[in-house]
Image (cartoon, rainbow, N blue to C red):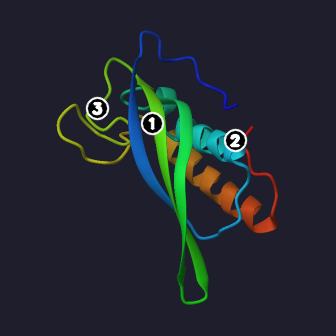
Amino acid sequence: AAAVPNCASNAIVKSGFALLTFVNDEFPSDDQMSTIFQDAYNAAAGCSEKYKRIAVEATMKSQEVKQYGPDLFVDTWWSADIACVPDCPSEPLFGMSLLPPQRYLEFTEDTSRRKLQEINVTLQTDMAKGVDSSIK
């Protein structure tokens, strides 16, 4: 299971949905993918983000493999329960305000952006090597 940061006391939990596309059709197990999703999201958002968003659960609902020329892409659809403080934006995963949805995280520290970039590089490298890329 993913480690959940402890910065969201008195949090409100709402469900959000996301489409993530991967350039490779080889995946770890569903449990590992859920942990990777949560850990990556929490490292990028988490306690440094405006709404202190924490993914407390994530589930891949479906996936579809598509081929464009020689390359395979996989669209994955996710649902996630997100804890927010003091309230969740209208779109809890990536919304920027309590107003109608606009999808991106609003960072309060530049370090969160660097963490997300480092995670992306690690995941791409590990998946290319066929290594278990669950974040620890």
Report the amino acid beneath label 3: Pro
Residue that mark 2 sits on:
31
Residue closest to the far left: 99
Instruction: Provide residue 57's location: percent of width, then percent of height.
Output: 55, 31
Number of marks: 3
Residue that mark 3 sits on:
89
Q: Secondary structure at mark 3?
A: loop
User: Quick one: label 1, few (<14), some, or many (20+) residues within 10 Å?
Assistant: few
Mark nearest the camera among 2 and 1 is 2
Report the amino acid beneath label 1: Glu
The residue located at (55%, 38%) in the rendering is 58
Of callouts 3 and 1, the N-terminal one = 3
Label for residue 109? Answer: 1
Q: Is residue 53 something that shows in the picture? A: no
Marks 2 and 3 sit apart, C-alpha to C-alpha, by: 27 Å
Indicate whether 32 appears above or below 64. above
